[in-house]
Image: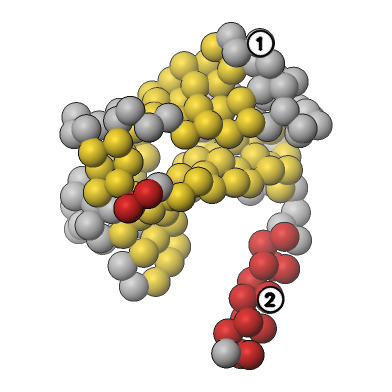
Amino acid sequence: MNRLCLIGSILILYWACEPGRRYESFQDLPSQYWVVTDTLSFYVDSLETVSPLVQSIGIRYNDRYEYHNLYVRYLLKDGLSNTVMDSLVNIGLFDSKTGRPLGKGFGNRRTVYDTLPGNSLPIGGSIHLVQYMRKDTLDGIESVGIKITDGNGAP
């Protein structure tokens, strides 16, 4: 048990010291289902904006997910809730030819990051994500997150 706590602490310190990271947050999905009516919102109003920024989406998924990709509608809003950007993002989760899972992880769980459009964030802004697949309820999506780094940092 002590060894597990030590390894967890080291991993947390490693991720916390990543250069260029300005913001990162994940939202777990109940029962590992993403329903089409569930909008995931990330409020980054406390983030000091520095241009350019790299915005990335992170998808934690497992082998119960039945498609090779995931379409996500990305909405960027300003402090007054006006939509600044509305875009559809196609995120590859499995290799379309071999079926092998993409991203990092072990066992049947993986995390994939993909860059979102745009390189700036309005003051008081928020990011909203909606799954945009043809199926109303997606099984195997464990959590979805946003990562914002400086323009010279890696997503």
* Residue drawn at x 60%, y 46% as measured from the top left: 25
Q: Callout 1: 10 Å neighbours few (<14), some, many (20+)?
A: few
Q: x%, y% of residue 134?
A: 19, 29
* Residue drawn at x 66%, y 83% as measured from the top left: 6
Q: Where is the N terminus found, in terms of image quarters?
A: bottom right
Q: Nearer the viewer, residue 154 or 146?
A: 146
Q: Nearer the viewer, residue 25 or 71?
A: 25
Of helix, strand and loop, which one carries label 1? loop
In the picture of the structure, the residue carrying the numbered disc 2 is 10
In the picture of the structure, the residue carrying the numbered disc 1 is 80
In this view of the protein, can residue 152 be seen by the observer? no
Of helix, strand and loop, which one carries label 2? helix
Q: Which is more foreground, mark 1 or mark 2?
A: 1
Amino acid of disc 1: Leu
* Residue drawn at x 56%, y 21% as measured from the top left: 76
Q: Earlier in the sequence, mark 1 or mark 2?
A: 2
Q: Nearer the viewer, residue 154 or 142?
A: 142
Q: Nearer the viewer, residue 14 or 143?
A: 143
Q: Is residue 115 left or right of residue 132?
A: right
> Label for residue 147?
none
Question: Which residue reaches farthest bottom?
Answer: 2
In the rendered image of this protein, does residue 39 appear above or below residue 19?
A: above
Q: x%, y% of residue 128?
A: 50, 27
